Amino acid sequence: MPRTAFASTYAPRRCGIATFTHDLATAVGDREIVALHPHDEAGTYPPEVRHRVRRDVLADYRIAAEKLNAGSVSVVSIQHEYGIWGGRDGEYVLDFVRALQIPAVTTLHTILRHPTPHQRYVLTRLICRSEASVVMSRSAADLLARIYGVDPGRVDIIPHGVPDLPLVHPDSVKPQLGIQGGPVILSFGLLGPGKGLESVIAAMPAVLAAVPSARYVIVGATHPDLVCREGEAYRRGLQTRAAALGVAERVQFVDRFVGKAELGAWLMAADIFVTPYPNLEQVVSGTLAYAMSAGRAVVSTPYTYATELLGNGRGRLVEPGSPVALARAFIELLNDDEQRLALGQRAYKYTRSMVWPQVGAQYRRLFERVATRAVAAVDDASAVGALLV
């Protein structure tokens, strides 16, 4: 197994890609980390973080690449999302990969259907510079081929990893979270505009009229970048909206970044999980994958990733931005135990191939393939050089 370096944001930084990278690197095994962070937020990292890159300091990228070139790493796994890399549209990732003498494999977390010319340039150049690229769904691979002209043969589809949670009845978990009965509708993740949570809050008056014991729980801290810009104004706005609608007592905020054990408990305690995202271009959602892995019934807007994963009766899709459609789906599922549990069971079965040990094994095979190909290329070049001497 080749030693792998992962270049990404990294735990304990509070962002979805940092969590993903930590879980992936742990599942893969022999690894070291190149941690990206804002200039003023270095943080305290675990020992596997061997290199630090200040996101907006271009020189740091070349220094990190040179250290990797001189070390024992055989493959570099790059996690790509425009916002975590420095420069315009994260273009410093290109400087990093150009400086590498080690093959790179890039996992694509964001693929825009309507990119700007420069966003398209950054993504296509990164793919060209990488020995292989990974997406997490068939729809994402199709999008790369149709919109960006990427050769499908250069793209591997490996699903988003999920924890291996037991399939349990929600009521068996609620007491440990202080919930005394009543169904739970759940969202989790870093808070910020664009998640569509306002629509769920707006749906709650109708839900409570039909199911008075229901509650909507929002688990997660506000995104740290948003906190830096405007503090907790967004969360306060959600709370104000709930109060104005008279549902504040049935909308619960768990205002912190929860650990894996507590997150698993909240997922298992939920009767319905909801991703009401208005951005229908979203090609991956770790929160959706996690909820399915807990065997929860999912209600979602039909963004790209949800449409693929929730097909064939694995969830319920509703029109975006419609509190009426959300309320209708919630009420129907909360009043039909058999249908709700069946949705969750189908989701649970679908995600058994997505648990982290299996996803880690798929990445290991990919890294081995890329590293072997790189060694063979060096051997071929050496053989040709010897003939020319």
Image (cartoon, rainbow, N blue to C red):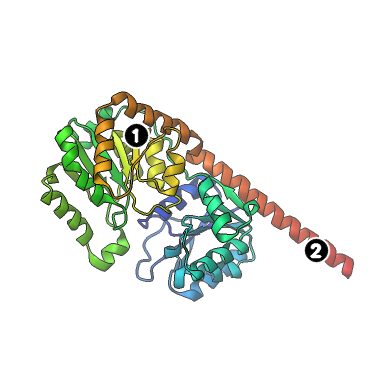
Q: Picture coordinates of residue 149 (x, y %)?
A: 60, 59
The crowd level at tag 1 (other Cα within 10 Å; few <14, some 14-19, many 20+) is: many
| Numbered label attached to residue 297 | 1
- Name which residue lies at 43% across and 73% down: 56
Residue 127 in sight here: yes
Image height check: is 187 above or below 31? Answer: above
Q: Picture coordinates of residue 230 (x, y %)?
A: 24, 66
Residue under circle 2?
A: 382
In this rendering, would 352 be left or right of 183?
right
Q: Residue furthest top?
A: 338
Image height check: is 152 above or below 261? Answer: below
Residue 184 vs residue 246, the one in the foreground: 246
Q: Picture coordinates of residue 61 (x, y %)?
A: 51, 70
In this rendering, would 320 be left or right of 7?
left
- Name which residue lies at 27% across and 56% down: 222
- Name which residue lies at 61% across and 56% down: 75
- Residue 14: name its quadrant: bottom left
Residue 25 vs residue 231, the one in the foreground: 231
- Residue 38: name its quadrant: bottom left
Residue 253 in sight here: no
Residue 82 vs residue 24, the one in the foreground: 82
The crowd level at tag 2 (other Cα within 10 Å; few <14, some 14-19, many 20+) is: few
Residue 44 vs residue 201, the one in the foreground: 201
Foreground tag (1 vs 2): 1
Amino acid, disc 1: Ala
Q: Picture coordinates of residue 64 (x, y %)?
A: 53, 68
Amino acid, disc 2: Ser
Disc 1 on helix, strand or loop? Answer: strand
| Numbered label attached to residue 368 | none
- Which comes before the other along the chain, label 1 or label 2? 1
- Name which residue lies at 40% across and 48% down: 303
